[in-house]
Amino acid sequence: MKSVLGDRKAIAILLGPALLIYTLVMLVPVVWSFVYTFFTGDPLSGFTFVGGKNFAHMFSDPQIWSAFLFTAKYALLMTVLQVGLGYGLALVYNFILKKSSSIIRTLVFFPVVLPTVAVAILFQKLFQSAPSDGVVNNLLTEIGLGRVDWLGTGTTAFVVIIVMDVWRSMGFYGVLIFSGLLDIPEEILESARIDGARRWKLFRHIILPLSMPIVTASIIFSINGTIKVFDSVYALTLGGPGTSTTPLTLYMYAEAFQYSDYGYGSTIALLLTVLCLIVTLFIFRSSRRDITV
Amino acid sequence: MTAATATRPAPARLPRRTRPFSGARLVRNVLSTIVIVVLLVIEIYPLFWMFINSLKSNFDFLNNPTWHLPTSWEWGNYGAAWQIGSLATTITNSAIATIPSLILIVILGTAAGFALEVMVWKGRNTVLLLILGGIMIPGQMILLPLFTVYYNIGVTGTLIPLIITYTATGLPLTTFMMATYFRAIPREVFEASTIDGASILRSFWSIGFPLIRNAIVTVALVQFFLIWNDLLIAITFADQRPLNTVQAGLLNFSGDYGSKQYGPLLAAVCITVGGILVIYLFLNQRIMKGLTAGTLKG
């Protein structure tokens, strides 16, 4: 029987096309991109070999440092907010709304499937300050606080980016963690309640430890996604004002396509890839230790 | 998850309705009402705001508080949005880029998932791991070599680069999800069919494919949203105006007219959001399930 399921020709026919496309369009370019890090130039004007100059430049480039800091700041804050608020939502769905949670879950999830550009334009207008105020400034003026030039400074623009991305993604983490909470056996909760565990105690000693696997999965997914943030920043602020909201992805994009330096662009992309790898491995290993101890 | 949701409340009802004081129930009802209202406002108000402002004239938008209803309802903004935003072109472009990619992703990904999960051969775990690694690679890492190739073979004026790139970037997750779905089907099903004289390829096509029809719809939905909402690949390989996808077109519309034609711009956004809303109204459970399943497995 094994011979039928081990039919080499059939395996080649089934797997071949996918593997070929994957190799040609993803694996080869990754290696190729790595080779670019030793060159400078672009396809139109040609490439020149520069050796390790791109890497040397990377270590003395203040802008890559600020882009790195922005990425780290964004990824860290977003991960905390996404997983934290997602957990909060999941608790609300599971323990407060109970049966009626389905429609609220569906509603809060909706922004997840909306195109980033559409959401970014909406938030630009909500937080608009010139030539006239958007609804956020309307509200601030109404309650007596001053209006804010939201997209005019780096700090406030960062706030808008965070608010927008939280609005966009919290429903996703809510449903994700909710599905994890559903896996906690009802008998365990019940016997804990009988033993007198209420609210905080029940949460601290039963629900939280038992939901750690889904929290870890959420953190890995969140960090991996937020390190690669591009669409929302590109559509909302284009990295501005100045370069104050430029993450690594956007800096890479600008270096490659505005300044036509594919070599340095690839170097930044490599840094990004290595970053993703390190973070994933790190979280994976530390979560393994948590479970075994 | 739907099944789990449905069965969830039943066991909870049994022993613990004997609350010590009836006040607890009241507190919970008030609490859940507050939570519902807050969530409704947070989620719906921005969209509602966008809709009423898409119906305002420029003068109205600029001179009155933006939470007011329009002084006159400018339904013409939608026609203007369709015209200025060349939505007919961008929607067509998005469809041309998305549909072939989706078909290729589903067929190739399902076949690969079958070969990696159902077929028995040495090295399949290594190959699966290799494909899995692709989920983590940032798009930026493959953009520049691909651009060089597309430029040199002369396809930069078409939507072909988008189709190729979307297909390749969609394959890792799809293959992996498909492999997981095939794991749930006993191998005997396929073995039995081959005894009856069907070749394994035939039994993949006529038994495997129909068996995971539901999974295919879910995976296709996930990929649809990833591709339809993509910005990075769209602006890199299709930045000329006639090739713009919906997202790129919206961005250019905003850049060109965003500070002059508020109504039409917001109308264009409403049209984009409305289209997604229609799909979401019919398929929301499946979409939520699919998108979150992709995470758990990836």
Image (tube, grey):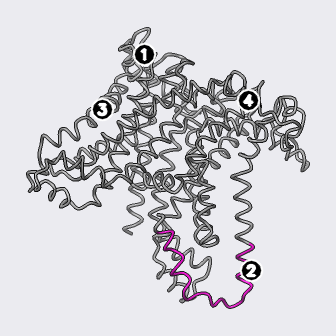
Residue at the disc numbered 4: B264
Span highlighted in magenta in the image: B4-30
Which of the numbered marks, if any, corresponds to residue B26?
Answer: 2
Helix, strand or loop for disc 4: helix
Inspect the image, locate mark 2, and give the three-letter code of the amino acid beneath it: Leu
Q: CA distance from mark 1 to mark 4?
A: 43 Å
Chain label for disc 4 = B
Using a 10 Å C-alpha cutoff, classify the residue at mark 2 as few (fewer than 14 neighbours), some (14 to 19) or many (20 or more). few
Q: Main secondary structure of the magenta part?
A: helix
Q: Is B282 situated above or below B94?
A: below
Helix, strand or loop for disc 1: strand
- Where's the C terminus of chain A, which quadrant? bottom left
Inspect the image, locate mark 1, and give the three-letter code of the amino acid beneath it: Thr
Q: Which residue is more in the foreground, A238 or B70?
A: B70
Q: Position of residue B194 (x, y in %)?
A: 13, 53
Q: Earlier in the sequence, mark 4 or mark 2?
A: 2
Using a 10 Å C-alpha cutoff, classify the residue at mark 1 as few (fewer than 14 neighbours), some (14 to 19) or many (20 or more). many
Residue drawn at (46%, 67%), measured in percent from left and top?
A: B3
Residue drawn at (40%, 30%), measured in percent from left and top?
A: B165
